[in-house]
Amino acid sequence: MREAAARALAFDLAGALKDAGLVAGIVVLLTIALVGFRTQDASGGAALSYRFEDVFAVAALAFLGRLAVALLRAHRPRPVLGASVLFALALTALLLHGAETRLLPFASAPFNWTIAIAAWTLSARAAWLLWHSASELSAEARDALMDRIGARVQRSAGFLGPLLLVAAVTLPFLPWADRRLLDIATLVLTYILLGWGLNIVVGLAGLLDLGYVAFYAVGAYSYALLALYFDLGFWTCLPLAGILAAFAGILLGFPVLRLRGDYLAIVTLGFGEIIRIILLNWYEFTRGPDGLSGIPRPTFFGLPITRTPPEDGHSFHSFFGLEYSPIDRVIFLYYLALALALITNFVTLRIRKLPVGRAWEALREDEIACRSLGVHPRNTKLTAFALGAMFGGFGGSFFATRQGFVSPESFTFLESAIILAIVVLGGMGSQIGVVLAAILLIGLPEVFRELNQYRMLAFGMAMVAIMVWRPRGLLAHRDPTVRLSDHGPPR
Amino acid sequence: MNPLLSVEHLTMRFGGLVAVDDVSFDAPARRITAIIGPNGAGKTTLFNCLTGFYSPSAGRMTLRHPARGEFLLERMEAYAIPAKAGVARTFQNIRLFPGMSLLENLLVAQHNVLMRASGYTVGALLGMGRYAQAERRAVDRARYWLERVRLVDRADANAGNLPYGDQRRLEIVRAMCAEPVLLCLDEPAAGLNPRESAELNELLAFIRDEHRVTLLLIEHDMSVVMSISDHVVVLDYGRKISEGTPAAVRSDAAVIRAYLGEEDEAAPGRP
């Protein structure tokens, strides 16, 4: 018996080398055209340059990585640990010292960092195997573990929420909070707001909406047009934009909400495009592709946040007798986004515990059963659609006032896809999951802007990885909205 | 006494197929009426017409609500039939809200009452009204029914994780939480073992006697039909072939023919 087991675990070096060679060959085939050649600007047109050393580096790394994985699979962590730690250490040291680029596998630093991180991951995996010899976690065990983590996070929302809130409120005053960090945080908050809004529609009511960006656009253009044509201020326009977006949601929802699943998804996708194309082509009203500029900035209860106060009054800093600092407005916008997001969260959490919220979730679970219990399916869905659209409209208004400029280009399908990805990755219906996913999907790519176009590649890979490991989203744990134990004995 | 439900000349056609063909019967108030018949006799189609999931091709269905007056069910939309006329139903293949807790399942059944109490959400969102009180009453009602089917210990667990027999009973008490006057059960005993089946009989008799609800049930299990129903309607190929007390129906030649087939004329000597 033991011999058989030993033989089963025996390492087939020749096989592993062959396999690794095959993988390296495939990598060469895949990358030679994409990586190996490069067109460059030259006098009188484009010229071809060659980067075969990069192809070679990629293939060599694939070969080594595949070999390491094969060794780990056969429970031979020792050589992998040694080699990968050495490699990772060397690479990290070189990178940190900014050494001669010739020694590094790639010319661009982000790639080298990716490789270093991969090497560290391999080392960690090998070390884990060495200490927990042969205690491989099965897929179910891993799933159960993640479920428990999800449940624990959800349970601890009681103190995690306030903790996050305190962190969010104090962020602008932290020593390392520069303009760039605040801008990224504001962007993340905008997406959290949008994610929470869409979560009502997709997560709670189970209506797959691929055109959420339409409501974002309606909100943004409502504010921009109202402000430019009627000279209304931000605080008047914000509720109006929300109402207009909710109205757009009802207009769309009325005819299409009898459709289910895929069909609804297609119609909403179309609606998103229709709105964008209307904005693009109705030149006299929306100024089409030129966009609308000069959108007024928000005021602090009527006090503009500008360097020079208006002639007949005060600006924010002169009213409070403060020194003007250009970061004031960034901080103000950050708090504005935070406040809007918190309102969304509060309303959603509250409504989830009300009968209409339960009816949304029941509709997601079984629409026919709902009808048999006297729940009006269309009206209930419409409320979800309208409310989700309203928060989308708030997000849009905020976007318009922050940018000072809107054009149809900001409201493409990609925006819808990203917001939907935030909801799905976070775990449908999970509020804190949306926060996590927004930080992961919006915050990290912004931080790693140097990766340029490879950002989207990493984004896609992260999505695939999460969908493989956590098909129901990061935190897909649902707590009941009401517990019998909370209600005590009957009276 | 007037029957609670009168079905007159009900016909349901799907293209060329006549699933229910000119069926008329009465369901007496506070009695259990069983609808039986071989597979494909049109029983579930009849239920779907009654509860608004199909709109019948012809016929009239009158429900006489003791408190709210008469309703013509064929003119009402599916969601309005439980909400206004007080007709609740269960399904042949159980339709719970599997991802929600037992208690939540029973609260969704009280949706319309709670919606009014919450001021159609706006009131409760602004902290007005007496929503907390209404919710407490709803929870108490849910607790009452959960205790009745001995599921109160699992009130906060997901409905999808219940064993099959418990899911059946939960679906019945969920329908009862909607406070119906007519409860339509589509094969409530399907897949139950004899002990569960006996418990079901007890529950149905309790609903009829203590809550004064009229029951209409489709059933294949003859032990259930014969032991608890007060009135039996037999359908075959969409037509009503017999109606009466269980004992009368059992000895009806037409019923025996429908269930067992024509007697073979080539073997006349058999008893």
Image (cartoon, rainbow, N blue to C red):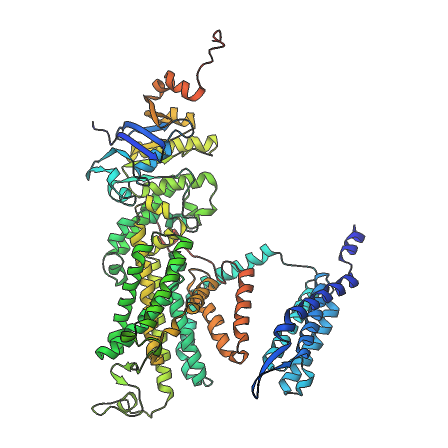
Q: Residue furthest top?
A: B269
- Whether residue B251 appears in this view of the structure is no
Q: Residue furthest right?
A: A3
- Whether residue A274 appears in this view of the structure is yes
Please tell me which residue is depicted at 38% across the width and 63% down the height of the picture. A211
Please tell me in which quadrant of the rendered image residue B167 appears: top left
Q: Position of residue A15 (x, y in %)?
A: 77, 61
Please tell me which residue is depicted at 35% across the width and 86% down the height of the picture. A328
Q: Position of residue B89 (x, y in %)?
A: 34, 39
| Relative side of A62 to B15, left or right | right
Task: From this view, report whether residue A161 is shown above or below residue B43.
Answer: below
Q: Position of residue A449 (x, y in %)?
A: 51, 79
> In front here: B206 or A428?
A428
> In front here: A41 or B220?
A41
| Relative side of A328 to A426, left or right | left
Please tell me which residue is depicted at 35% across the width and 47% down the height of the picture. A370
| Relative side of A476 to A383, left or right | right
Task: From this view, report whether residue A376 is shown above or below residue A334.
Answer: above
Q: How many marks?
A: 0
Q: Position of residue B117 (x, y in %)?
A: 25, 53
Q: Residue furthest front?
A: A44
Task: From this view, report whether residue A289 is shown above or below residue B178.
Answer: below
Please tell me which residue is depicted at 43% across the width and 22% down the height of the picture. B259
